[in-house]
Amino acid sequence: LHAAYDPDNIFAKMLRGEVPAVKVFEDDVALAFMDIFPQVEGHTLVIPKDVEARNLLDMPADKLGPYMQRVQTVAQAVEKALQPDGVRVMQFNGAPAGQTVYHLHFHILPMVDGSETRR
Ligand code: 5GP
């Protein structure tokens, strides 16, 4: 769960501009982009910049507040843009918990009445 941060993970490459991303928000603290395999329409990911955090458990506490502020900003923007009936925010730590990419990210899923997802 507490392995070393791999600077060649796909989101780190995205932050360096080495792989493309459909960006929807960016400032000095965080980047938000569309998930490449969306579980629902509008599935968005928010990642912190300038920090080597594999997941929430590794995130320096002093950087968490500003980052979570951006998670909220993006969730509000998704809600405003898509007018869903609900917004699911999720985050996984470690493979058994469902984590597949090891740079901290929060998922934002706009949900509509009657929609079902695998998690
Ligand atoms: P996790 O399971 O680690 O919480 O979620 C990782 C998410 O990243 C998955 O929803 C997956 O679809 C998404 N993802 C993986 N590789 C890429 C990529 O190269 N680009 C984008 N935009 N999303 C990715």
Image (tube, grey):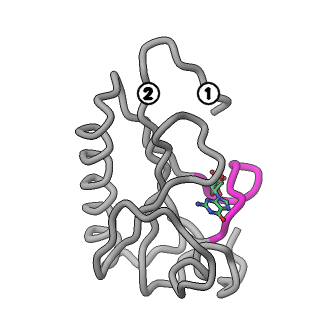
Q: Which amino acid does label 1 sit on?
A: Thr
Mark 1 Cα within 10 Å, few/some/many (few <14, many 20+)? few
Q: Specify start and end residues of the magenta stretch as a single range.
A: 92-102
Q: Which residue is drawn at 58% across and 73% down?
A: 20
Q: Which amino acid does label 2 sit on?
A: Met
Q: Quadrant of the C terminus?
A: top right
Mark 2 Cα within 10 Å, few/some/many (few <14, many 20+)? many
Disc 1 and disc 2 in contact, CB within 8 angstroms:
yes
Q: In this view, does 77 lie above or below 59?
A: above
Left or right placement of residue 13 versus residue 69 in this view: right
What label does residue 76 carry, if any?
none
Label 1 and label 2: CA atoms lie apart by 9 Å
Quick one: which residue is furthest to the right in this view?
96
Q: Which residue position is annotated with label 2?
A: 111
Location of ligand 1 given as a quarter of the image: bottom right
Q: Is residue 71 above or below residue 14?
A: above
Q: Residue at x 25, y 61 (%)?
A: 69
Q: Position of residue 47 (x, y in %)?
A: 46, 68
Helix, strand or loop at disc 1? loop
Q: Position of residue 84 (x, y in %)?
A: 34, 27
Magenta stretch: helix, strand or loop mostly = loop
Left or right placement of residue 68 versus residue 97 in this view: left
Q: Position of residue 50 (x, y in %)?
A: 43, 87
Quarter occupied by residue 78: top left
Mark before the other along the chain sequence, 1 or 2: 2
Q: Where is residue 91 in the image (x, y as percent from the top left)?
A: 53, 51
Q: Which residue position is annotated with label 1?
A: 117
Task: State the residue in front, 107 or 18.
Answer: 18
Is the CB of the residue bearing disc 2 within 8 angstroms of ligand 1? no
Residue 99 in magenta? yes
Q: Is residue 60 above or below residue 113?
A: below
Helix, strand or loop at disc 2? strand
